[in-house]
Image (cartoon, rainbow, N blue to C red):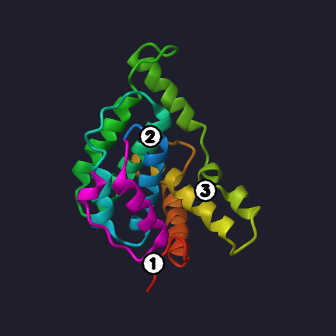
Amino acid sequence: MLSDITITIPNKTAQTKYDNLAKNMSFKSKGDMESLLDLIKILYINNYYEEALLCCRLTNDVKFDNDFDVWTFIHRIWMFEMQILVHFGKKEEAEEIATKIEAHFKIPMKIWNTPEKRYAQYKKNRSRIVLKDLSHKEKINSTPRGESGEFDWKFVALSSLIEPITLNNMTGVSVEEAVEIFRQYSAELQQTKKYGVSL
């Protein structure tokens, strides 16, 4: 459990999420998994890679139950785990996680009742996604520059941008451009009180 991991980061947002989750966390709770993902993102963008990896690995043995309200967040946690593993030179381990994620989209559902039909629908859905949707450009541009709303949307966007970066599964999205925007947002978030660290 998260309470077994000691995390001390000079960031109030992350510390509050950690303290709350350490007391009581359910892998079946959408809210808890979203909070865990947020904690991991703050750790990641501030270069607390080892702590972020420990948090990611808490979800490794969770059994997939087709509840995408929850698993959308767990999958994204796994994508951050992949990114960290690549950072540490463990590309093969990262690829194993990608295979696990992909397998979840081959499990038949009511409409797409064979692995082939289910996976084809998954690929079709991903092919429709474009970078401006992932980066939340329109929402960011509609908020006053330099105010909290701008950075909140950039923080949210990291959860979307991580998918093409790690899985390279969107034909309409340039991985290089996604990486560039991800790095830009991360650098800007590092400088904020809400998402950065107090020096």
Magenta residues, as a range? 1-26
Q: Residue at x 40, y 43 (%)?
A: 74
Could you say which quadrant of the image residue 67 lies in?
top left
What residue type is disc 3 on? Ser
Real-space CA distance between mark 2 and mark 3, rounded to the nearest whole angstrom: 26 Å
> Circle 2 sits in a helix, a strand or a loop, which is it?
loop
In terms of sequence position, does the residue under pointer 1 or pointer 2 come before the other? 2
Q: Find out whether the residues at labels 1 and 2 contact each other: C-beta distance under 8 Å.
A: no
Q: Nearer the viewer, residue 173 or 83?
A: 83
> Circle 1 sits in a helix, a strand or a loop, which is it?
loop
Percent across and percent down for residue 26 are 37, 42
Instruction: Return the mark for residue 29.
Output: 2
Q: Do we see residue 40 in this rendering?
A: no
Q: Nearer the viewer, residue 110 or 195?
A: 195
Quick check: 191 above or below 102? below
In terms of sequence position, does the residue under pointer 2 or pointer 3 come before the other? 2
